[in-house]
Amino acid sequence: MAEISVSGRLHRVAEGDRAPVSFRLDGREVTALAGDSVLTAALTNGRTLRVSEFGDGDRAGFCMMGACQDCWMWTEGGDRLRACTTPVADGMALSTIPVGEGLWPRPA
Amino acid sequence: MATSGMRAVVVGAGPAGMRAAQTLVAAGIRPVVIDEAGRSGGQIYRRPPEGFVRDAETLYGADAAKARDLHAMFDRLRDAIDYRPDTLAWNVAGDMLHVVTDGVADALPFDALILATGATDRLLPIAGWTRPGCYSLGGAQVALKAQGCAIGRRVLFLGTGPLLYLVAHQYRKAGVEVAAVLDTAPFAAQVRALPDLMVRPGFLLRGASFRAGLQAAGVTVANGVVPRAIEGGREVSGLRYRIGDKEHHVAADAVAMGFHLRSETQLADLAGCPFLFDAASGQWRPDADRDGRSPRAGVYLAGDGARVLGADAAEAGGRLAALAALADAGHAVDAGELAALRRRMAMLDRFRRGLATAFPWPADLARSVADDVILCRCENITAGQLRETASAKGAPELNRTKALSRIGMGRCQGRFCGSAAAEILADARGTPLAEVGRLRGQAPVKPLSMATAKGTRP
Amino acid sequence: MKTRADAIVVGGGIMGASAAFFLARAGRSVILLERGLVGQQASGTNFGNVRRQGRYLHQLPLSNRARDIWLRLPELIGEDCEFLPSGHLRVSYTREQADRIAAYAEDARAYGLDLEMLSSNALRARYPYLSADLVAGCLDPTGGHANPRLTAPAFGRAAVRAGVTLYENSEVTHIGKTGEDFVLEVAGRGELRSPVLLVTAGAWGGRLSALFGESVPLATHGPQMAVTEPLPYRIVPTIGVSTPHVYETVYFRQVERGNVILGGSTRGPASNETNRAAVLPDNFLGQLEQLRRVMPGFAAVNVIRVWSGVESYLPDDMPVMGPSATTSGLYYAFGFCGAGFQIGPGVGAVMAELIATGATSTPIEPYSIARFAR
């Protein structure tokens, strides 16, 4: 499947020589680098991390140090993770939009 | 009392926490050190993940030697301490610190709890500040230092404080286009602060050289800026601002903003430390004596989490807090060392006063935020909703305002709206800032997974 | 400054604020005294359950009366306090408890409460996120929840609009009776007088009743409350575990904004000396265990805040409500045993009726303070 080209919000200015990590972002197979946070991984491949719950649009993190909590993402499987403090890992499947019915709350 | 049996817990592994741990180890104690990060260093001396290659000079600039020294010291300490990285200290109840590591809870009893919890950016809302592309100054620095990334192609730096110039300088050095550096503080304030800032000529000179370097590279560096709005649609496109009567516009695809720093005081609050209103900064801080001893027995405060004095003061404060804990436990403490550290703290405190004069918190800017601007990023509460709660619902202080309006009730617990909310509330009520109080800390200090399992008790 | 009224109400929780409101509507002049701010204690910190199901049968008439008020809040006090009648579901892990729930459903019908028993299969079909270990459930489609932080203050403001004089931050330091009048000394307000005194002082009510020779064995506890981050709105009814084991009794409700409010399991300590109540970390972690047990999907999400408040309990789990047995003109409504929120507006209406007319059509005899007299 052809990769859709989306320019990232963050761009790398150093430390480019690291092993690649493959993960999925909103259904696209994309690549980051070992040592990236989920935030870096998602925002070098996309523009946003989440949608504000209260109708004021997209968010892409803010403090990057685990204080503002404005970068909590959903995984495709319905788990939550704080993008700025979680290292990206091979095979992760991240979503910038909330999960559908059946994933929250997950069936017992 | 046999001090070797003293149960000491240090929260934070930045300069204050690391020096506190070192001082305790030197006295024959094996402290527990709780670090929310995966690697020690705190924010200022944050270590990039394994596999990153930039050297200390690139990462820490003129502080490279200090960083190397601290990291090496702490690495040597590893066998002498119970170091717990990736661990959240989420509550203090009685004489127990409650932590979670890898989803398992643990309760740590303590005789001495040294809180070295650091600081985060102090923010105030500006129209459009929730747009993607807008980050805190500290956040912009973390992206560069710990991830080798810039937050945009053309980055605007807005706010006040020494970090404004430092991060702009670091971005420029990394080859990122700096759109402008816009300081809300008037230049006259920086001149007025010179006598106090002169106590640290090296530091002062470095700040001046950042500014000069940016200007020499053709970057607009302006003082007395009144930001009007961060513009754009779904993305940041620039900033509209005013200087005097003149309107300006600068194009940028990212904004890094911050107005100096605020202490992380939740654990001190949960531990029951009394707080004092500090009129100079317009903030509440946990009460402590000059060594960091709080009135709450067994709780000590060090570093920027106690009071924002910077990294060098954090090192001294970490040592002092550990010495205070040792002295209180009946341990002999070197009077000469104590006196030297106190002198150093006094000098650094004078420098802090200088910084407060040079980069004042723009209270008027916070108070004049328009009604339709989002104040609480978490809950999407506007400044107007806060004002309405203050007047129509008669909320006299911040916690009542929180209960009735949800301001500060979201995931961040008021870290990023609390300062401005206090100003707006005081303004709406016509009362002094101190009278509207402060948002009480509530556990958990950070969001806690509901999968958290009870651990085994020591 | 107003120093005399037809009635003085001491305690500005949901009981006092609504009683003051209904008294003013009945044409009485009222002073409402609150030591702190209206609705700050148990009224503002509870779970927010607007439920009739599970209450003592003898309390259902009062609960029904309250329900009518909840449905009319916008008309009565100008706001809905986020009341959402989205249903109230009780579930159980054991057959024995399911039988008890079913028997209750049978008995409650006579009081106008129509409950629907659900088999484990029906539960699975309607609420696939609930534990497969549940053997039965019982739904009250008319139940629901509201925002306790907003409710008592809304009644307080409505009371003021109706003519009530509200004094906040006004602690009563002394109460005496001179002739027909109660004489109250109030910090910062001087001496206030009234022929009628209503004590709605929650955990502090026992101190005031003791002044009139009516001691009650009032105990204080703190509810262990928590709230999750905002999540997509999917859990419609308020859901609670029905069990004889206190540690298993967790309950939760999702507000339309998305946060899930969590409560139950073991209670924590609370003090009516310091006015503080604590969430004990151990209780909280135990509560999480029980919440994961009833809804395993909770394991995926985060709690962002915990809180407690000072609630008061009596040994028979029933409130003190009605006239004093020793002193004419004196009335009580306190000690609601962690179950006062839904009935609160009804309590206010009943107390106002009792004071204004000398009688009430709603039975409250079981709650007489005289039951503690020796």
Image (spheres, helix red, strand yellow):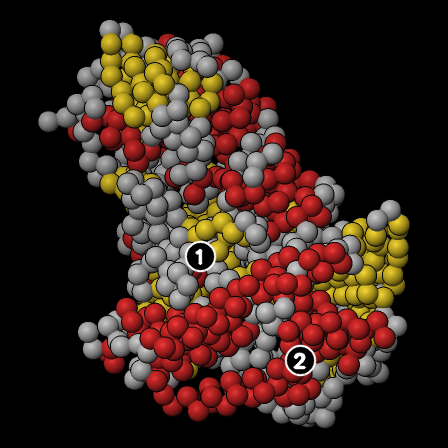
Type of the residue with mark 2: Lys
Q: Which residue lies furthest to the front in this view?
A: B195
Q: Which of marks 2 and 1 is in front?
A: 1
B435 or B344: nearer the eye? B344
Q: Mark 2 points at which residue?
A: B145
Residue B378 placement (x, y as % from top left): 62, 55
B111 or C77: nearer the eye? B111
Q: Mark 1 points at which residue?
A: B286
Q: Is residue B103 visible?
A: no
Q: Residue at x 74, y 86 (%)?
A: A14
Which chain contains the residue that carries disc 1?
A: B
On the rendered structure, is B89 left or right of B132?
left
Q: Residue at x 25, y 31 (%)?
A: C206
In this rendering, is residue C177 above or below A48?
above
- Which comes before the other along the chain, label 2 or label 1? 2
| Picture quadrant of residue B4 | bottom left
